[in-house]
Amino acid sequence: MRTALRLAASTAIAALLLLPSIGYAKTPEEAPEEAPAGIPETPPARMEVAFVLDTTGSMSGLIEGAKKKIWSIASHLQDLEPKPQIRFALIGYRDRGDAYVTKRFDLTEDVQKIYGELLTFAAEGGGDTPESVNQALAEAINDLAWSREDDVFRAAFLVGDAPPHMDYQDDVPYRDTLKVAKARDIIVNTIQAGSMQDTTPIWQEIARFGGGDFARIAQDGAMVEIKTPYDIEIQKVQSELGTTVIPYGKKIHRDSVRSKAGLSAAAPEAAAADMADYLRKSAKSKVVTGGGDLVEELEEGRLDADDLATENLPEAMQAMSPAERQAEIDAKRSQRAALKGELETLLEKRAAYLAEQEKAAPAPLDSFDREVRGMIAEQAARKGFTPAER
């Protein structure tokens, strides 16, 4: 059992009118494909998880650890059954007078985009102890594009070390925000970094009225990065897979796809291996998330090779003849298939190595990544998700 305190959901909040049920607007890459006529479409099991993260100076260790562990968290969630389609969101917060009060990145299946934004976060600012927790939590619940279907697991994780400012007259108090969260079936969990006494009772209260759990962890998050003999080779193969991506779309989108295809090479070795593991487990084993990879778009039937818009192709392919373009696409597809087979073998060996290491020296139960994974696994069971059988 984890040592962190587990708190039951409170029934003390008075009943309120449910807000209108409105579906979120899907981006083109998130819109589901139409099922063939006569075949009933089975909607994917979905999870939506938002991290609301204090990014002031005292949080530097935890932020750096989260950059290394976000892929491990995502990969473990892919082990649940039924395999979930996951959307992540990220809100960084500080306080008034700092470089920003909040930075918000909405819910998306494009996990590489969220990872890229997380990499830009640096722990700076802060002064007086309280932070703009009320505003960050209000934005997380009210401004993110949460879905409204009953069978979707929705959870926010408030992560920080300092209590909220309660003296800002134009703030929405967290108790009011938690009423909205309850009406929208959004679980609010809290993770306290460090042991600041003024923070603990408020974090506990937010978790209690948010229907979630509270955990207190070390200031730096206590995240343990286990390196394996396979990480370097996995990173190399994953980087080579990135070269099989053919960005397609407007130039700004092609540039984004190129950037995501190169993320593995820039990540720490263990994080790159976790990224590869997540991408392998995710739907249709993608190389980049968020769409825009011509090889995948053609394989999945979303584009026709005879109807490609020249201006949406990479510059090097725009001057090619149709036959030359097809030869380039076929070469990338063949290279990708071979690399995926090699990567699969390496990832299986890595998984076995990690399992042995975990038996020999279990990671701290109260680390940031273990707490997040454990809370989601327990809470998602209410929506029918269960651990995969090994």
Image (tube, rainbow, N blue to C red):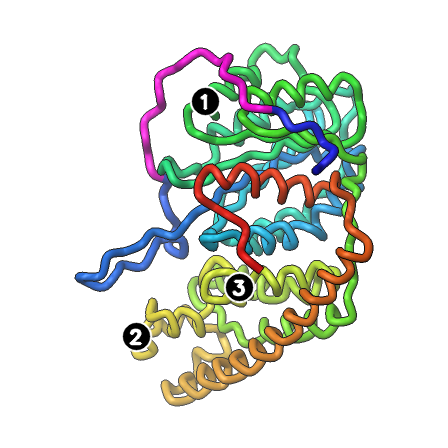
Quick check: 181 left or right of 346? Answer: left
Asked whether 47 or 360 is in front, the reply is 360
- Residue in view at x 76 percent, y 38 percent: 123
Q: Nearer the viewer, mark 1 or mark 3?
A: 1
Question: Element under label 3?
Answer: loop
CA gap between label 1 and label 3 equals: 35 Å
Q: Earlier in the sequence, mark 2 or mark 3?
A: 3
Within-10-Å neighbours for mark 3: few <14, some 14–19, many 20+: many
Residues under labels 1 and 2: Cα distance? Answer: 47 Å
| Residue designated by label 3 | 288
Kind of residue at badge 3: Val
Say which residue label 2 marks.
Answer: 307
- Compared to 3, does 247 lie above or below? below
Which stretch is magenta?
A: 8-23
SS at circle 1: helix
Q: Position of residue 310 (x, y in %)?
A: 38, 74
Circle 1 or circle 2, nearest the eye: 1
Q: Residue at x 51, y 48 (%)?
A: 386
Q: Residue at x 39, y 15 (%)?
A: 16
Q: Which dot, 2 or 3, sits closer to the camera?
A: 3
The vertical placement of 279 against 91, above or below, is below
Q: Is residue 152 visible?
A: yes
Assign the magenta stretch its main secondary structure. loop
Q: Which disc is residue 180 wearing?
A: 1
Mark 2 is on which residue type? Asp
- Characterize the local packing of mark 2: few (<14), some (14-19) or many (20 or more) Cα atoms within 10 angstroms: few
Does the segment drawn in magenta span residue 13?
A: yes
